[in-house]
Amino acid sequence: MSAPIIVLDELRKCYGELVAADRLSMSIPAGEIFGFLGANGAGKTTTMRMLCGLTKPTSGHGSIAGHDIWNERNSIRAKFGYVAQKFSLYPDLTVLENLRFFAGAYRVPVGERESRISRLLRQTDIEGKRNAKAGSLSGGMKQLLAVACALIHDPLLLFLDEPTSGLDPVHRQQMWDLLYDLSHAGTTIFVTTHYMDEAERCTEVGFIHKGKLLVKDSPHDLKEKFKNKLLELQVDPVMPALVQLRAAAGVLGVSLRSGRARVYAAEPEELLDQWKKNWPFAELKLLGHRWVDPDMEDVFKAYSQGYNEMLRS
Ligand code: ATP
């Protein structure tokens, strides 16, 4: 594994009484696509803003490429790019003018600017829009332009705060293809997302919940943390089944997947044996069952809901 490019050491941020990021410690090796996951308000943006030197940590430390994220914030800005949730493009400037503006702001050598801009326009596939006003672009194109602007100084590391939020599937795919290309070329990616299918695409994922880092691992190893496969029941009618199963003894939670009830339980085999002998739900018909491998949505659910009995410690 390569040396860490990002290190967080007991990093903490409080807003008055509220602890938005609670003693976060982790390191992220160079070259990773690190996915930072959590519900709304979990503390993702706060953490990213601390890493980018935009908000001062209350306590603890963080470093990027060995430099302190707060004390050396001005000198390390050139090492990373940041695409905020609400990005700061200039809507009245064209695509090209926005890129030129950011090239100036990041002090890209004048002789390199036009070739770099041409490469980024190609890479983000917005060449055809070079003379369009940024404000007239679709949401997806705006995001791609925001990424292009954040890459204008060839950073080692790119932070993206929910870059695919609100994008259609085609633009989401396009964004991920771009992130893969960047990663392939050696850029480390730190990305926040709500989408579990996107978590699958990361080399490592960290789950943050109420400011605390619950777990950090590869998607493969996170799924391996489940002690058992998951029980899925085909029940009719399925919607009332979700409610009744959720309230049953031994059941931690239930979710609807492809018309089936996916049951979260510490002892699912015992539960199924018991139900086969004595089905306790008079209004529900059990049509069948199957065992399924957990996916990232299950991982997220188990960690965020605290289904610890289902997980290896
Ligand atoms: P989302 O997915 O909605 O963007 P998030 O995981 O990025 O959420 P944060 O934006 O980091 O979460 O917010 C974490 C907590 O800190 C929330 O309770 C939020 O209301 C609070 N918070 C964030 N910024 C401030 C601020 N400037 N002042 C006070 N509270 C704040």
Image: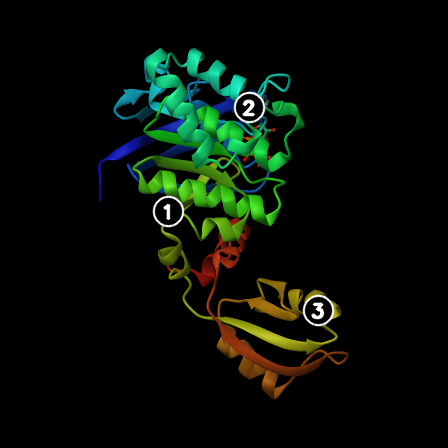
Q: Amino acid at mark 1?
A: Glu
Classify mark 3: residues with Cα within 10 Å, few (<14), some (14-19) or many (20+). Answer: some
Task: Specify the label residue 95 is tagged with.
Answer: 2
Q: Which residue is mark 1?
A: 204
Are dots 1 and 2 in contact, CB under 8 Å?
no
Q: Earlier in the sequence, mark 2 or mark 3?
A: 2
| Residue on which the image places disc 3 | 244
Q: Secondary structure at mark 2?
A: helix
What residue appears at the point 53 percent right and 36 percent down from the top-left corner?
Answer: 163
Labels 3 and 1: the sequence-earlier one: 1
Helix or strand or loop: what does disc 3 sit on? Answer: helix
Q: Is residue 157 left or right of residue 46?
A: left
**Where's residue 69, x and y in %?**
35, 20
Q: CA distance from mark 1 to mark 2?
A: 33 Å
Q: Residue shown at 38%/11% (left/top)?
A: 107
Residue at mark 3 to residue at mark 1: CA–CA distance:
36 Å
Q: Does residue 313 lie above or below 55 as drawn? A: below
Determine the CA span between mark 2 and mark 3. 54 Å
Q: Is residue 46 above or below residue 37?
A: above
Q: Element under label 1?
A: strand
